[in-house]
Image (cartoon, grey):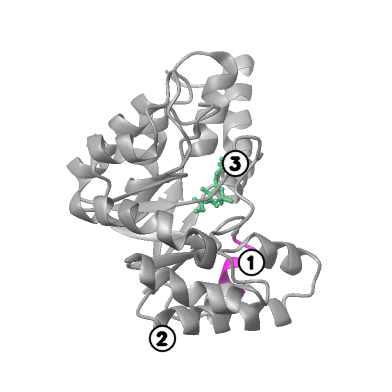
Amino acid sequence: MTLLSVNVNKIAVLRNSRGGAEPDVVRAARTCLDAGAHGITVHPRPDARHIRADDVRALAALTRERGVEFNLEGNPFAPPRPGYPGFIALCREVRPAQATLVPDGDGQITSDHGFDFVRDGEALRPLVDELKGLGCRVSLFADAHAAEADCSIARAADCGAARVELYTGPYAEAFEAGDAEAMLARFAGAARRARAAGLAVNAGHDLSQANLGAFLAAVPNVLEVSIGHALVSEALYAGLEPTVRAYRAIVDGTRRA
Ligand SMILES: CC(=O)[C@@H](O)[C@H](O)COP(=O)(O)O
Ligand SMILES: NCC(=O)COP(=O)(O)O
């Protein structure tokens, strides 16, 4: 069974654009859980462009109260700065059920690659150990689309992680271009190699209602997908019609109190 963890970063993008409290990230997360999401993901970034440290604390409380998984993503090597205590510090504070380490840089508009485990393994190992000591399951963001990933992904197990999260952005692009077959074979191979090394497999980035089914059919036994950007975009389309109708009822004076 594949679990769905909804990433609510984009709710915070909208909230921050006006500087107020709406849309409310915790309310949105609660709605996702009420609708059947198995967990909540956030990826606070050092520039606090969307999720802030306080959101992390509030979502940790919500997911604890609801008994569901909180998946906290971030770069453990990014230094703290005002408003961002650092990824490991946040994990020490809220102890997410799953900590997903992602090697993203400051200037990146979004995550666009996984770790090079051959190069980064030594540096990751003590961090993975500490996170495990905090009670977090550790997942490492991993490339699956390029030939170089073939040898690297199995090395993720040497870092002590329980899982890898396959970076699915390149699959989403190939799907969009109508040319996903070879890419799916690559992902299926990477997932096989990860499992053979003792790692369970998550997946995420740019997954959507359009491309998710084909991915899960071709890459079996994915334990969790985390989905945010497309899901929130689709929710806007799904919600616009009833919302506009509700406003029309108000301006037309036909809405009952
Ligand atoms: C690791 C990953 O693929 C997601 O966390 C993605 O990076 C979402 O982050 P943004 O919402 O900042 O694009
Ligand atoms: N780990 C991937 C994630 O949380 C969401 O990525 P996206 O759906 O916003 O691209």
Work out how far the residue at label 3 is from the one at label 1, CA to CA, in angstroms.
Answer: 27 Å
Q: Quote the CA–CA distance across marks 2 and 1.
A: 26 Å
Given this view, does label 3 or label 1 mark the residue nearer the observer?
3
Q: Is residue 213 magenta?
A: yes
- Residue that mark 3 sits on: 105
Specify whether residue 254 is in view.
no
Mark 2: secondary structure: helix
- Kindly identify the amino acid type of the residue bearing the numbered disc 2: Ala
Marks 2 and 1: CB-CB under 8 Å? Answer: no
Q: Which residue is at 69% across, 76% downward?
A: 183
In percent of width and height, residue 94 lies at 24, 38
Report the span colored magenta: 209-214
For residue 196, the mark is: 2
Give the residue at mark 1.
211
Residue type at mark 1 is: Asn
Looking at the rendered image, the disc whose residue lies closer to the viewer, 2 or 1, is 2
In the image, farthest residue toward the right: 177
Which residue is at a point 59% across and 20% down the rendered structure image?
17
N-terminal of the pair, mark 3 or mark 1, is: 3
Mark 2 or 1, nearer chain start = 2
